[in-house]
């Protein structure tokens, strides 16, 4: 079975951080700089992500301003994923409809995909029926996300923090759902891949950079570290997705990829517990962003995090 909708790209997807000016809101100029830095080396960008783009704490107006500002800058052929997950079903529907209305007016020429973490605001019970109603409101395809740590922070006492496998099997019968960004155990990953095996066009992305480097999925990765190390992440992603290429016959190439992957893993371990604040600080030190301001509600850097950032930047000559 195949979908009649646009197939998401393979490769490196960068969930963009959301730049702010100190005390004055979204920094569109810095966003444009970041897009120019990232855009030439990725297969797609993700806007307003809950984990990296501070989507959990952004106001609806800020999210809409972010989407419109980015789409006016992003090259027209670059696939764009837009995170629409909100605190409730009603808010999620509202931001999806308002963003879609903007997209219809501007006619962005590149591929557009919604990205949604459904268990953030909805239980497994009735989820296929919920998406049936949502898909009546949009003409764009949807990529699901399964990231249980986000659900744990929001719903600590909920039994199921993942999309259940039998629910996923029903969801992929909706051909407007075209992919899944996954974080979780290897066992669940295997079960999910079996569940979507009947959809040859379905994209399965790793939403955990460490898992991708160690045992890559077939289609790509959502890598927050690509905000900073875009070229390095592109080379590692290409290597992971093309492991039988002739270049792997050469010891120097393999050694170079292992060194690069090791550096990216060290970086990931540094930012994993507070991605927006740490990545913004590193981007500021590297001269890519003029500021490292975070949104209200995002945790500030600790003394230990500041020290880790300084040590990393000195070691890899980012300053």
Image (cartoon, rainbow, N blue to C red):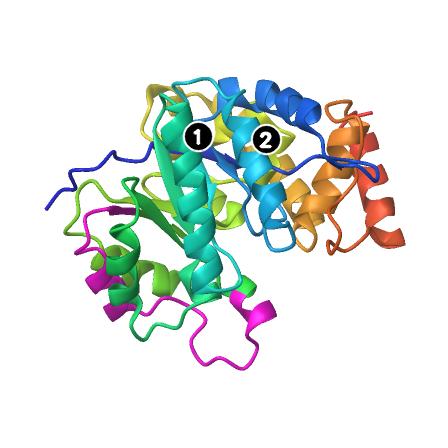
Q: Nearer the viewer, residue 194 or 64?
A: 64
Residue 154 shows in the view = yes
Residue 193 horizontal/vertical position (percent): 27, 55
Q: Secondary structure at mark 2?
A: helix
Crowding around mark 2 (Cα neighbors within 10 Å: few <14, some 14 to 19, many 20+) is some
Asked whether, in this view, residue 94 is left or right of residue 279, the answer is: left
Residue 268: percent from left, percent from top: 63, 45
Looking at the image, residue 170 sits to the left or right of residue 296; the answer is: left
Range of the magenta residues? Answer: 151-178
If the image is split into quadrants, where does the C terminus sit? top right
**Position of residue 195 in the picture relative to residue 302 (left or right):** left
In the image, residue 245 sits, relative to residue 54, either above or below, namely above
Mark 1 touching mark 2, by CB under 8 A?
no
Name the residue carrying label 2.
Answer: 260
- Residue name at image x 55 percent, y 33 percent: 258
The answer to which of marks 1 and 2 sits earlier in the sequence is 1
Please tell me in which quadrant of the rendered image residue 28 appears: top right
Along the line of sight, the residue nearer the viewer: 164 or 295 = 295
In the figure, residue 178 lies in which quadrant?
top left
Where disc 1 sits, the SS reads: strand
- For the residues carrying marks 1 and 2, which lies nearer the camera in this image? 1
Image-quadrant location for residue 262: top right
Q: Residues within 10 Å of mark 1 (few under 14, many from 20)?
A: many
Circle number at residue 44: 1
The span from disc 1 to disc 2 (Cα, nearest Å) is: 21 Å
Residue 206: in sight, yes or no?
no
Report the front residue among 81 and 247: 81
Spot occupied by residue 165 in the image (x, y as percentages of width and height): 28, 67
Name the residue at 68% across, 55% down: 273
Rendered position, 45 above or below 120? above
């Amino acid at each position: 079975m195949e979908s009649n909708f646009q197939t998401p790209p393979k490769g490196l997807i960068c969930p963009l951080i959301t730049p702010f000016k100190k005390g004055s809101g979204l920094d569109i100029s810095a966003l444009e700089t970041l897009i120019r830095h990232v855009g030439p080396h990725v297969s797609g960008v993700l806007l307003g992500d809950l984990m990296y783009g501070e989507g959990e704490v952004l106001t609806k107006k800020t999210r809409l301003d972010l989407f419109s500002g980015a789409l006016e800058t992003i090259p027209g052929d670059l696939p764009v994923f837009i995170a629409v997950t909100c605190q409730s079903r009603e808010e999620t529907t509202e931001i999806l409809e308002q963003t879609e209305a903007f997209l219809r007016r501007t006619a962005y020429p590149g591929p557009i995909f919604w990205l949604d973490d459904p268990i953030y605001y909805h239980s497994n019970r009735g989820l296929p029926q919920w998406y049936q109603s949502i898909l009546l409101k949009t003409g764009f395809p949807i990529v699901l996300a399964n990231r249980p740590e986000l659900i744990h922070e929001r719903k600590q006492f909920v039994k199921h923090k993942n999309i259940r496998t039998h629910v996923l099997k029903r969801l992929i019968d909706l051909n407007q759902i075209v992919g899944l960004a996954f974080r979780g155990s290897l066992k669940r990953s295997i079960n999910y891949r079996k569940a979507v095996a009947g959809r040859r066009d379905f994209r399965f992305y790793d939403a955990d950079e460490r898992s991708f480097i160690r045992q890559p999925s077939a289609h790509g990765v959502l890598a927050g570290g690509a905000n900073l190390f875009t070229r390095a992440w592109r080379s590692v992603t290409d290597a992971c997705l093309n492991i039988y290429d002739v270049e792997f016959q050469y010891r120097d190439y393999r050694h170079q990829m292992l060194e690069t992957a090791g550096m990216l893993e060290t970086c990931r371990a540094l930012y994993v517990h507070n991605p927006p604040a740490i990545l913004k600080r590193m981007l500021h030190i590297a001269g890519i962003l003029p500021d490292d301001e975070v949104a209200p509600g995002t945790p500030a850097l600790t003394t230990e995090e500041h020290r880790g950032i300084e040590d990393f930047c000195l070691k890899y000559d980012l300053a």
